[in-house]
C-alpha cells in the first residue's frame, strides 16, 4: 500500500485521539456502521478510541483565538465608540457561542474518527467490498441476520454468502 500524505484532519485526529491496537469485533463494526448510517453517535469503546480532552481544549482555544483576535483588531475602533452596555451584551453572546461551539467541535471530531475507524476495520473484515458501495447493503443483510438469530460465529459467513448471491 502506498504511503499517502496525511490530511490536516488525519493529523488532528491522531493528535486528539488514543486508538486501541485491538481489532474491532465484527458485530461491533456492524452495529457501529448501522448507528453511524442512522446519524447516531457510536460508543467509542466499541470502535476503540478515546478523546484526549486536554488536547481538544487546547486545539479549540487556538482555533477560537485565530478567529477572535483578528476580528477584535479590526472591530476595536468601532466598538470603542458604542455604549458599554451593548459591548457587555456582545461579550456575553460571544462567550456563549464559544462554549456552545466546543460541543459542536467535539461532535464533529467524534463523527470523523468514527467514520475513519469504521472504514479501517471494514478494510480488514471486507477487503473485496468497498465501504462506500456496500455499507448499506451489508447493513440490510446484518439486520436480516439479527431477525433470523444467526449466531456470532456464523455471522461473517452469512453476510458474505448473501453478498455473493446478489
Image (cartoon, grey):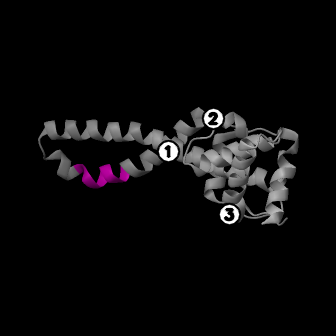
Vertical arrangement, residue 119 with respect to residue 129, above or below: above
Q: Nearer the viewer, mark 3 or mark 1?
A: 3
Say whether disc 1 or disc 2 marks the residue closer to the N-terminus.
Answer: 2
Confirm whether residue 54 shows in the render.
yes
Q: CA distance from mark 2 to mark 3?
A: 29 Å
Confirm whether residue 126 shows in the render.
no
Residue 132's disc number: 3
Residue 52's disc number: 2
Residue that appears at 78% across and 63% down: 129
Vertical arrangement, residue 163 with respect to residue 73, above or below: below
**SS for tag 1?**
helix
x and y, in percent, of residue 125 in the image: 83, 52
x and y, in percent, of residue 3 in the image: 80, 63
Q: Is residue 141 left or right of residue 61?
A: right
**SS for tag 2?**
loop
Residue that appears at 21% across and 37% down: 89
x and y, in percent, of residue 25 in the image: 80, 41
Magenta segment, prevailing SS (helix, strand or loop): helix
- Label 2 crowd (10 A; few <14 / some 14-19 / many >=20): few
Q: Which residues are magenta?
A: 69-76
Amino acid at each position: 500500500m502506498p504511503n499517502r500524505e496525511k490530511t490536516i484532519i488525519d493529523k488532528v485526529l491522531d493528535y486528539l485521539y488514543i486508538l486501541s491496537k485491538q481489532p474491532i469485533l465484527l458485530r461491533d463494526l456492524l452495529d457501529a456502521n448501522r448507528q453511524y448510517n442512522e446519524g447516531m453517535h457510536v460508543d467509542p469503546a466499541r470502535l476503540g478510541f478515546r478523546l484526549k480532552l486536554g488536547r481538544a481544549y487546547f486545539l479549540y482555544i487556538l482555533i477560537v483565538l485565530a478567529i477572535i483576535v483578528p476580528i477584535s483588531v479590526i472591530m476595536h475602533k468601532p466598538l470603542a465608540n458604542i455604549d458599554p452596555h451593548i459591548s457587555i451584551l456582545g461579550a456575553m453572546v460571544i462567550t456563549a457561542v464559544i462554549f456552545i461551539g466546543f460541543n459542536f467541535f467535539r461532535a464533529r471530531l467524534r463523527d470523523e474518527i468514527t467514520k475513519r475507524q469504521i472504514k479501517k476495520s471494514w478494510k480488514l473484515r471486507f477487503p473485496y467490498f468497498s465501504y462506500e458501495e456496500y455499507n448499506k447493503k451489508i447493513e440490510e443483510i446484518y439486520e436480516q441476520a439479527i431477525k433470523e438469530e444467526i449466531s456470532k460465529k456464523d455471522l461473517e459467513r452469512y453476510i458474505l454468502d448473501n453478498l455473493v448471491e446478489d
